Image (cartoon, rainbow, N blue to C red):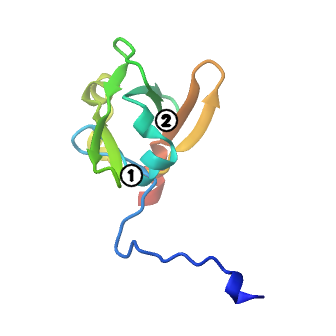
Amino acid sequence: MDYSTLNLKKFSNVGSKISRKISITGSYSFGIPPAFYEEHGIKDYSYAVVFYDEKNQVIGVQFAKEKEKDSSFKLIPYGNEVKMGASFVARSFFNTHGIDIAQIKGRYDPKEHTFPDIGKVFLIDLKERKQQEE
């Protein structure tokens, strides 16, 4: 191998936390970390629409540019231009479905899925956290 042709790039993020997991917090919020925010172009969206499959305990989050009456949560961006993330408070969602936030708060690895009638949704399997505890 001819090492002179390598295109080495200096790593400059020592000590930084890189997470792609969506968090559900004790304050009834969803947290969208900077890595996920950037990779999925969340900066182009202003709202989140939340779905729930009670039987399977799966939450779906879809990002939207336009507000849907009675169905949208406002995204609250945080950070700076270099490292942006977002969150949204969904207390009404958790309370409506009787979801005990203390039992499910934590970080989840969302699975992307496209439904023909809904579009692209990020799925959060609440059973994932329970399995991590066992």
Q: Which residue is mark 1?
A: 34
Mark 1: which secondary structure? helix
Vertical relation: 41 (above or below) 93: below
Front disc: 1 or 2: 1
Q: On residue 52, which mark appears?
A: none
Residue under the point 61% across and 36% down: 113
Q: Quadrant of the C terminus?
A: bottom left
Q: Which residue is mark 2?
A: 58
Q: Position of residue 48 (x, y in %)?
A: 39, 29
Q: How many marks?
A: 2
Query: Is residue 134 visible to the viewer in this orientation of the structure?
Result: no
Q: Would you identify the image quadrant in which residue 83 lies?
A: bottom left
Residue under the point 42% across and 58% down: 19
Mark 1 Cα shell of 10 Å, populated few (<14), some (14-19), many (≥20): many
Q: Position of residue 5 (x, y in %)?
A: 70, 81
Q: Position of residue 129 (x, y in %)?
A: 43, 51
Residue under the point 27% across and 50% down: 79
Mark 2: which secondary structure? strand
* Residue type (three-letter) at the residue carrying disc 2: Val
Answer left or right for 9 relative to 71.
right
* Residue type (three-letter) at the residue carrying disc 1: Pro
Of mark 1 and mark 2, the one earlier in the sequence is 1
Query: Is residue 80 visible to the viewer in this orientation of the structure?
Result: yes
Residue under the point 39% across and 52% down: 34
Answer left or right for 55 relative to 91.
right
Q: Which residue is the extreme one toward the front? A: 4
Q: Which residue is the extreme one toward the right? A: 1
Q: Quadrant of the N terminus?
A: bottom right
Mark 2 Cα shell of 10 Å, populated few (<14), some (14-19), many (≥20): some
In this view, the residue in front, 95 or 118, is 118
In this view, the residue in front, 14 or 119, is 14
